[in-house]
Amino acid sequence: MTSTNAFSNLQKHIPVVGDMSSKSPVAYRATRFAAGIVNTAQMTLAEAYINGLEIPDSVFRAAFHTSMPILFKHLPGLLAPYEWVLNESDHLAESSRELMEVQYDRPQAMLNRMLGDWQVIYPKYSTGFWQNGAVDLEESQMHMIDQVIERLEIVDGDTILDFGCGWGCVPNYIMSKFPNVRFTGLNLSHEQCEYMRRKMQDPESYLSSGRFTLVEGDLNEVQFAEKFDKILSIGVFCHVGNLTNSFQKLASFLKSNGKVFIHIITARIPNNMSSGFTHKYIFPHGRYWNHDAVPSHDRDLKTVQRWYMNGINYHKTLTAWLERFDESQEFVKTLDYGMDYAKFRRIWRFYLLMLGTIFATCDGEYNGNGQYLMTHA
Ligand SMILES: C[S@@+](CC[C@H](N)C(=O)[O-])C[C@H]1O[C@@H](n2cnc3c(N)ncnc32)[C@H](O)[C@@H]1O
């Protein structure tokens, strides 16, 4: 027996430490109990901050830089505050409508300022890629999409489905590079679809080229008559709770020799993770899949290549979003959030600061983005 196996066997009986899937029933229950305590502590801190507790950003960051490496390396089971984080859900995506209200249909003038809105790069709500020397957020997003083009092997003439297409940034940029590519974009957010409908009337936008079809709908229910050469999905599978059924669905939309590219936040730990704060205030039923989850669901689609994008990329992106959010206060405080603006601002600062810091811990080696190239199994 190797020493790794000996440790796996030992941790089966030790609560809290290591992989949840290998725990004995007693150690599992004890770990679940401890995860509840950690979650309560985190929620207490989050709600104190939301209700006005002054914590300097530097102290906030130091607290996460100290605690997260311990949790990632030794106690990852404590990062799963609820049982559902560890298991596949009934629906492809749970709480979709609530997610739109809490997150994606928030005042667009605020989101667009935070994310950036340029000539070709529309608001893009996923990481930029900074490692190729990008000098700013806009360029980091171009570099990120360039990488998708290369890894998904997009060629002119492809028909592509963007599953969860945001504001149409990725289709717009790719169509600017390939004059014969056709895109279909799926999105449940009515406000984001309204943005794209305006661009579809704007002669300066590639979304108005007649090569872009917009489908406002829920990935739980959507069906397409057409099959696609390529399917891409960027930053959406953190909202998908059932990989088995969603891959079955994607496979049914894909031509026999087609390719799928999934880009999502992942954690290089044995279990999936989430947080009580993000579930309640930011992404209802959102989860970060562990980095091996996608390839371990090789039933209808199989992973033929995978990459890990270091978390420093998302750290830089979230830091840019936080700066832009802070800089736009004078304007965005006048918009209607359905709650006191000071409270809204604190919820979003907590979110941007927390995530931005966590991605930077352990030099970005534990929490970053996973990219998966898939074909029919
Ligand atoms: C994090 S954003 C990423 C958007 C885009 N791919 C990008 O990179 O900018 C997630 C997107 O998925 C969409 N989405 C989330 N849940 C969905 C669902 N159940 N059905 C359809 N779209 C959904 C959201 O409205 C949002 O546009």
Image (spheres, rainbow, N blue to C red):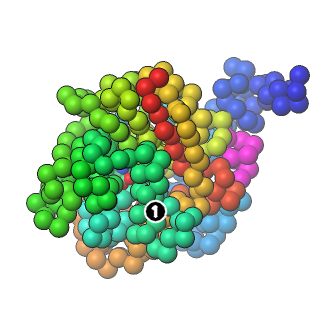
The spot of residue 86 in percent (x, y) is 56, 31
Placement of the N terminus among the 4 image quadrants:
top right
Name the residue at 70% across, 56% down: 362
* Segment tinted magenta in the rendering: 69-76
- Establish if 304 lies above or below 104: above
Would you name the residue on which mark 1 appears?
Answer: 143
Residue at the image point whose x is 30% and y is 70% from the top: 118
Q: Please, what secondary structure does the residue beneath circle 1 have?
A: helix
Report how many numbered discs are placed on residues in the image.
Answer: 1
- Quarter of image, res 207: bottom left
Residue type at the position of mark 1: His
Q: Tell me: 56 left or right of 186.
A: right
Position of residue 159 measured from the top left corner of the image (x, y, whole percent): 27, 41
Closer to the camera in the image, 50 or 216: 216
**Does the magenta run of residues contain 75?**
yes
Residue at point 35% right, 47% down?
Answer: 155
206 falls in the magenta region:
no
Q: Is residue 204 left or right of residue 20?
A: left
Instruction: Please say whether residue 345 is visible from this viewpoint.
Output: no
Residue 294: x, y in percent?
52, 33
The quadrant where residue 30 appears: top right
